[in-house]
Amino acid sequence: MSPDDILKALYDETLVGNGARVLELTHVGLDAGMSPETMLFDALIPSLEEVGARFERGDFFVPEMLIAGKAMSGALDVLRPLLADTGVETVGTFLMGTVKGDVHDIGKNLVNIMLEGAGFHVIDLGVQVAPEKFVAAIEEHKPDVVGFSAFLTTTMPMFKANINALEKAGLRDKVIVMVGGAPVTQEYADAVGADGYASDASAAVKRAKELIRKRRVAAV
Ligand code: B1M
């Protein structure tokens, strides 16, 4: 198979949620010398975007979204060590979680992989993370940054609830708050009082580094 054939097949098989074939094709691509980034950004992510578009049009339903998401997660498991293995020094600790009421985790996991690749120590609290759990984990791990992911317009208000919980616990000034997820915008991040927002995984890495640098300079 040519690289273009592999990308097309990865896109098509993710779209129909054929996890076994997506896994196989991921290995075929790697064996053929393709980069993990190419498979991710030129096939897997665009395919999930198409899944979302079909769901919006009513051509796909939740089960189709679910199996496509699972197929993508299987490929990510294979690509994770390759994307994260850059051997750079730790630049800071990043505590991450998808907010309460929200089960989407593929985007969050991708951000984690990119953060690890850039040298962050990442602590992932998983999905449906309640404000009290974020508070307890910040007290325990003392991260530089806490990241809240939300993928539904109905769960975005949890950002504010989480920030309120941090304020109540006296932690707001001790940690940088970043937010992100498909429906989130810079304006929304500003409105809830977050320190940073990023639209995708690489922007998240860049923004987290900038915010840490600023805070360390301000502390000197
Ligand atoms: Co859901 N879903 N889903 N879904 N799902 C979306 C998000 C949706 C946009 C589909 C659509 O209508 N087009 C829509 C939300 C609409 C809205 O509110 N605006 C939607 C809906 C409605 C729902 C349900 C309500 C459906 C239902 O039950 N009727 C339901 C909700 C369940 C719940 O959470 N309570 C639901 C369920 C599911 C599945 C479980 C079936 C499955 C999730 C599987 C999983 O995650 N393990 C699923 C899927 C797969 C999707 C789509 C198709 C794909 C999501 C994805 O993984 N994208 C999605 C459509 C879409 O996004 N186009 C959709 C790929 C991923 C790499 O991108 O998630 O945007 P993304 O992550 C990016 C950025 O957002 C950013 O970086 C990531 C990497 O570049 N980012 C950050 C993420 N977190 C960040 C944090 C940061 C910074 C950047 O700092 C802290």
Image: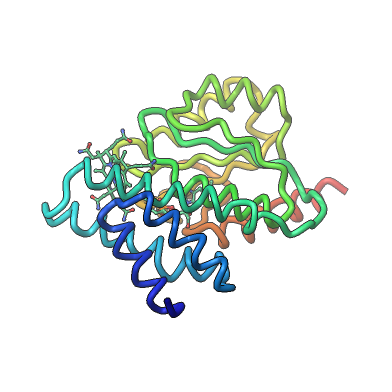
* Residue at the spot 38% in from the left edge and 76% down from the top edge: 5
Please determine whether, in this image, residue 65 is positioned above or below residue 48: above
- Residue found at x 19% / y 52%: 55
For the N terminus, the quadrant is: bottom left
Name which residue lies at 62% across and 58% down.
83
Whether 156 is drawn above or below 184: the answer is above
Q: Position of residue 209 (x, y in %)?
A: 70, 56
146 on left or right of 70: right
Which is more toward the observer, 35 or 146? 35
Residue lying at the far left of the rendered structure: 58
Residue 90 is left or right of residue 72, and the answer is right
**Quick one: which residue is furthest to the right in this view?**
220
Whether residue 154 sits left or right of residue 33 in the image: it is left
Residue depicted at 59% across the width and 47% down the height: 112
Q: Is 27 on the left-hand or right-hand side of 213?
A: left
Color encoding of the figure = rainbow
Report the number of numbered marks: 0
- Indicate the position of residue 89 as horizontal and vertical percent values: 82, 53
Say if 204 sits above or below 148 in the image: below
The percent position of residue 4, horizontal first and vertical second, equals 41, 79
| Residue 110 on image: x %, y % | 52, 51
Q: Nearer the viewer, residue 204 or 177?
A: 204
